[in-house]
Amino acid sequence: MTANEPLTTQRLLLCEGVEDAQFFRALIRIRNLGAFDVRWVKDVGGTAGISGFKDALIGSVALSNFRKIKHVCLIADCDNHYGEAFKNIKKQIVEANSDQTVEARFPVPDAPYKLANGSPLLTVLMVPSANKKGALESLIIEAMRDLKFFQKALTCAAEALTCSGADKWQQQKVDKATMITTLAISNTEDPAINLTRLWGRQPDLIPLTHKAFDDIAKALSALKT
Amino acid sequence: MKVATLGSECSGYRMIKTVTIKNFRSFASAKISNMRRINVVVGNNASGKTALLEAIFLAAGASPEMAFKLRTWRNQEVFNISNEQNSYDALWTDFFHMFDQRSKIDISLIDSHGDQRKLEIKFQDVGADLFLPLTGSSQFSQPQPVVPIEFKWKVHGKEYVSVPEIDNHGLKLRATQLAPIAALFYSTATQNLNQQYAQFFSALSAKKLEKDVIELIRKEFKFIENIEVLIKDGIPTLHATVQLLPEKVPLYLLSDGVNKLINILLGIAMFPKGIIIIDEIENGLYFERMPSVWRSIHAFARKYDVQIIASTHSAECLRALRDALSSTPDDALLIRTMIENGVTSTEQFLGSSFFKALEMGEVR
């Protein structure tokens, strides 16, 4: 994935970071969800993660072929409170629209998963799902819990979190720590594997066909053009 | 690098904010607004980048002669004229969109004060014929009626018209009374212009302004200690004093990058309040040098109140511009030319938008 990739489709997915972007690229490919351009907000304008959507929206309009994009989809983690996270994203869309240096205006959705009509269309999707706490890693752990291969490592990871007190962290942080630890201690070949490389190197380790990913896959495939 | 110049006077010029083009080369219609100090034109091959630069240069001028300067940038320096309409037409036809000579070319520049400078180019109505004189030469043996082309500039409600004519000496191009906007065009074709730059340097030196150029060059190329004009083989030539070399060396013996930056800086200093147009600015410049080159050009352009309009194919060049103008992103405008289904169009984005886009994907 290089910085010079041109937009080639009508649907643009903006993710919080490169790891999320690689996950969604793999999900779209494996589940054959249609044509998408997937970009992430990390390091855009010096802001990263969920705070970077404003800059990402302002920057995206200057990408070659953006005029052909029919639907922009922002995918964010619910974190500790999905309502607060959505409110934050909504505020950033409004701020991007009020930026006098950009002509494009994005429609502002009323709620997550709800289509906002305009040109382009805009939808905000949140993971693990509306009304839940957590992040993309929460979905991945849900899938890992169903896989025999990870059982022992998940137990050990839980013990490590308890031992260190990390189990008292916010849910999304617990899930991130659990996933990273579990992946590391169950992966002799590459303990440093992360989500950026996982789907390219070991695509079958966590099957993206697992039911834990059904809802987000369904939401993606429903994005109109 | 080939260079063409437009006048050296600059009466009342202010920064161009809007360019509107109709029926010129690949453009049926185009409008670029919100232009800035540094304007970078990107786009695929044959998408109209050079045509856009040419349109601005033509409108900034005050004489049909500019049209022939455009030819030299496209390596069409040689042309033949006979006493036939076809021959006369051939000089101008490629300026018209889809070669349609019945249409009228309109190029309009609106400056930062809202004043407009408009150029119309059209073949005059039938009846306003221009007759070729009868001569004894075989080339102009018969008088033929020729429908002449008209270049009309409109500024502040006044019209300035020039009609190129053919007489037995060749093509006669009359400058109008209109003052041109000071403009300098660096094209991609190479040509020996050492003497011209030596003259620029000499003129600056006479005004004690050459130090600015030398300082910036020394800062950028630390091995250069000084620049001056010396006579070589009877011709004034820019020379550099280079560290560790026993003699001063002609500048043209140094790298393309050194020469390019010096030439651009000299151009900026020589054409205050003017326009510097640079086709493929990245040519000859090492990528690591690009940010500081942009910083130098930007600083000089601000100092001399010059507007830069440059084309590039290089993503590195754009990232370098972002790095150089990170604290003043909206001093930069990205202009993208596009061609789709035979239709050429443009779009533009301020630095605060396209600098961010550079992190996300392709902007060229």
Image (spheres, coloured by chain):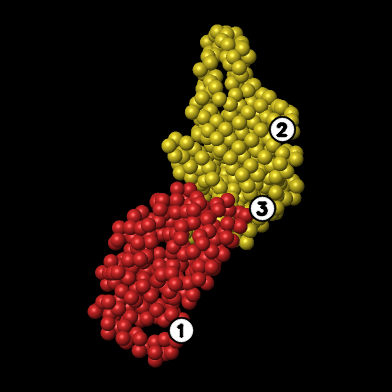
Chain colours: A red, B yellow
Instruction: Give the letter of the chain under mark 1.
Output: A
Residue B300 marker: 3
Kindly indicate the quadrant of the structure image that contains residue B161: top right
* Mark 3 vs 1: CB contact within 8 A: no
Residue farthest to the left, as pictured: A148
Position of the N terminus of chain B by quadrant: top right
Q: Residue at x 47, y 36 (%)?
A: B343
Q: Is residue A200 left or right of residue A171?
A: left
What distance separates the C-alpha of mark 3 from that of mark 1? Answer: 54 Å
What distance separates the C-alpha of mark 1 from that of mark 2? Answer: 70 Å
Residue A135 marker: none
Amino acid, disc 2: Val
Return the residue nearer the eye: B311 or B157.
B157
The reply to whether residue B202 is visible in this rendering is no
- The local crowd at label 3, few if under 14, some if 14 to 19, many if 20 or more residues have their Cα within 10 Å, is many
Q: Residue at x 48, y 77 (%)?
A: A80
Element marked by disc 1: loop
The relative height of residue A38 versus residue B349 in the rendered view (above or below) is below
Question: Which x, y percent locates residue A165?
Answer: 43, 89
Tag 1 residue:
A169
**Label whose residue precedes the other's in the sequence (3 or 2):** 2
Return the residue nearer the eye: A125 or B262.
A125
Amino acid, disc 1: Trp
What distance separates the C-alpha of mark 3 from that of mark 2? Answer: 29 Å
Q: Respond whether the residues carrying marks 1 and 2 are from the same subunit.
A: no
Q: Respond whether the residues carrying marks 3 and 1 are from the same subunit.
A: no
Tag 2 residue:
B155
Q: Is residue B80 left or right of residue B218?
A: left
Return the residue nearer the eye: B316 or A112.
A112
